[in-house]
Amino acid sequence: MRVLLTGAAGFIGAHVHRALVAAGHDVVAVDALLEAVHGTNAAPPQDVSSIDIRAAEALEPLLRGVDVVCHLAAAVPVDVVSDGVHGEAVGPRGADPIYVVGPPALGRAGAGASGDGAAGSSASRRASAEMLDDGAAGSSVSRRTASDGEGVNLHRDTESAAQDEGAKSASYGEGIDEARPLSGPATRPVVRHSGGDGSSGPAVGGGRRPGVDGPTMSVGPMFAAHNDFGTAVLLAAMERAGVPRLVLGSSVAVYGEGRYRGLRGGPFFPGLRRRADLDRGMFDHRLPRTGEILTWEPVGEDAPLRPRTAYAASKLAQENYALAWGMTTGGTVTVLRYHHVYGDSVGGNATLAAHSGVVARFRRELESGRAPLVFEDGGQVRDFVHVRDVAAATVAAVERPLPGFVPLNISSGHPVTLWEVASIMSRARGGPEPVVSGRYRTTDIRHIVAASDRAHHALDFTPRIPPAQGLTDYARKSANQTRP
């Protein structure tokens, strides 16, 4: 099969390129080698042509005889400093880190209020209980309405709605590992280092003004210029060349926040959390009228798409352009919504993106002898998928034509908290225990976990590298080394 692969020199693209060639495909590999992604004066790897897909005249000859385009080219936010969200974290002035007495547990709908199935962490649950016991705080919670940023409730909070949804709940999370959360080392309360003046340390956040602590739209034009315009140019060229199939690399970021449920209602797709709650260490989403902590559920591909950053908006725009192209031309589109991808670059082609994100930051901190710094209370749940599994899923999508427009979550199927990620990596290197800081960004996602059954059935894709194994191997490997 003849495949045009865009973004072939990128973090994911290089792995996909190698996997496609190994599978015997004829690959036409291109990459614009953007400075923001590859650094200055980057040279193209062997068998990759330096071509910007926004140049239509350069695409025309490359598309001749192509059976499928695998479109991975994108400008990405590479200066990620925390858990996969662009920007820096803040917290209340003078705030101490959250004290944690054990690993935050994974929370699922229908779980009890404590133990391995509890939502979020014991620290955030205790904080929420304390706030609700306080008269003023409790009354302010009860006065909140859905317009206060709590987002969308697709069902009324009634007994009948709960019964309706209960019939469906057995199918939610199919393909997700239901085992106990990965165990971490027993943690001691976080020790805050004393400053030289006898204080408990510097104020967290440095007096930032509200609303400037997270992603900004200043990078929006760059993402639109490359991701959106580039995709539109590529699709127009594919239409002229008569290429019938597209495999598009998208992102979990298109969902925004994850999916939640209360004890008697849901599903809920919340909006932003209140800064006042975050300042108090209340990180979990709650029902606006009762203050009940919501538990997360796996997010299916048909969930609402509500991006929170310019990058996420550009990835959703790519999906929309692809949908329109398919409807206009009759072509087929398989959209791969990659969840939190980690791993090392191929060979010596170390892109900046391969060293971004929370997993890469944890490794850098451990390499320097520092404890991994975990934001919020460490109970944020994610699905980390190894880049080699991502490459395998992408090759499967190239080789298996699907009818129409089909979005698929590409994930490991093993949800894990950020505290557990840091603990796994710390144990692997024999490093210090993670420090839970209580720092936050107002636009950060609390929990986002994929429902992966559709990809399994459509592509016969089963990831081979669980996070416990992959994160251990990744942590033990120096960031200065590359996988052969």
Image (cartoon, grey):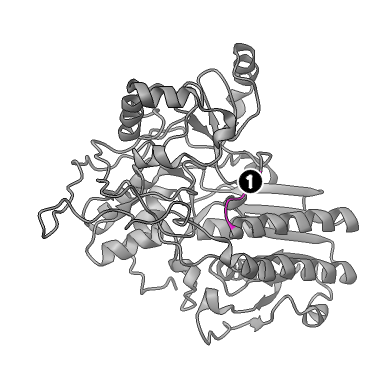
Q: Quadrant of the N terminus?
A: bottom right
Compared with 395, 139 (above or below) is above
Q: Position of residue 421 (x, y in %)?
A: 36, 49
Compared with 83, 361 (above or below) is below
Residue sitting at x 59%, y 42%: 452
Residue 119 located within the stretch drawn in magenta = no
346 left or right, relative to 365? right
313 left or right, relative to 441? right
Q: Position of residue 210 (x, y in %)?
A: 44, 51
Compared with 226, 266 (above or below) is above
Residue 307 located within the stretch drawn in magenta = yes
Q: Position of residue 123 (x, y in %)?
A: 30, 34
Please give the count of numbered marks on the rendered protein. Answer: 1
Quarter of image, res 361: bottom left
Q: What span is colored magenta in the figure?
A: 305-309
Task: Give SS at disc 1.
Answer: loop
Quarter of image, res 277: top left
Do we see residue 292 in this rendering? no
Compared with 425, 105 (above or below) is above
Amino acid marked by disc 1: Arg
Which one is nearer the viewer's eye here, 122 or 470? 122
Q: Quadrant of the C terminus?
A: bottom left
253 left or right, relative to 376? right
Residue sitting at x 72%, y 75%: 53
Residue sitting at x 39%, y 41%: 278
Residue with the mark numbered 1: 306
Which one is nearer the viewer's eye here, 273 or 210? 210
- Magenta stretch mostly in which secondary structure? loop
Which one is nearer the viewer's eye here, 116 or 37? 37
Which one is nearer the viewer's eye here, 258 or 134? 134
